[in-house]
Amino acid sequence: MGLQERASGLYFVGNTEPCVIEIAQGSDVASLLEQGNSQFDTGDYGDAIQSYTDALEVSQSNAQITVQALLCRSRAYVFATVFGSPGYDNYDEAMAAAIADCSRVISLEPVNPAGYYCRGFAHFYEGSRQEAFTDFDRAIELAPNNSQAYYLRGYVYYLSNNNGMAIRDFSRVIELAPDFTSAYFFRGVIYQDLQPQDAIEDFNQAITLEPTNFRYYQARGNVRSSLGDYQGAVEDFTKVIELAPSGNAYAYSERGLSLAALGRYREAIADYDQAINLVPRYIMAHYGRGLARAELGDAEGALSDLQAVERYYREDMGEGNLDQPLYQQILQAIERLRQR
């Protein structure tokens, strides 16, 4: 599993337990922590690291503030490296810094579970999976009702393709904290291929708790489409298009697919057009548009799309992937059009 694929869930992990400021309100150090949190929330992870570092320098004699700033900075190191911040392109160095911050927390407060589950999080992204699970287990041993520790361990199980253990941990999170939105989401992601109706129920709950998060609608739309509920899928992808912060080519393409399945080919083509405007070499959008054009009798337009798909697929996927089912379907569709 690639780094960016593994990182996708960090959006959710990062929002589950913000760096809470319960100390020294109104002081210089509280302002620095607040500034760091604000920078973290806007994706300025390098600047957040500097703010937390400044807070540490100001609060050298206060162990409680030091622990808070170290936990915040550890998380920022991970995000800065995974998502990219100027000056943090040395992955090993940044992860080592994150682990060092958490280890310092543990030395200051050996029974604080946050030090262990934050270090476990960093260990996983460093590539030390066993050390990660050891830290998560210790955090849960110290605080058996800590939903955050179960969540992070479940998330790492999910990334490790251990679905059974991930479901167990996410279910425990939901028992402890019924409003923990991300636990419903990731359990739903696991369920979508195993128990799709249960996946829809989890996505429903996530949407109820956080109705403006487009990712939840997108996930539910995918499941609805796979179950043949194309009208429901159209509704969900329409919501994604409304809520996504910028043009969402995937949502347009998938809504086009569902519209085509409903026989609404002209609307589908309009959506495929939008997807292609956003991502010109979007293979599935060109493929879907070609099939929709063929259904409307536009053989020339259909052939143009499918030939573009064949070319893009060959160029982007490489010669070693030309035996894949999709590529063979593309060739067969081109041949059918040529025979008309």
Image (tube, rainbow, N blue to C red):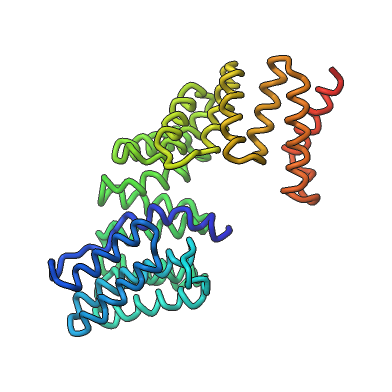
| Percent x, y of residue 202 | 38, 39
Question: Which of the 4 image quadrants contains residue 200?
Answer: top left
In the image, farthest residue toward the bottom: 61
| Percent x, y of residue 161 | 53, 55
Given residues 149 and 45, the one toward you in this image is 45
Q: Residue at x 48, y 21 (%)?
A: 231
Given residues 47 and 73, the one toward you in this image is 47
Q: Residue at x 34, y 73 (%)?
A: 50
Q: Is 275 placed above or below 187 here?
A: above
Quarter of the image for the N terminus: give it: bottom right
Q: Is residue 137 visible?
A: no
Given residues 237 and 138, the one toward you in this image is 237
Q: Is 50 placed above or below 265 here?
A: below
In the visual, does 257 lie left or right of 37?
right
In the visual, does 316 lie left or right of 189?
right
Question: Which of the 4 image quadrants contains residue 185?
Answer: top left
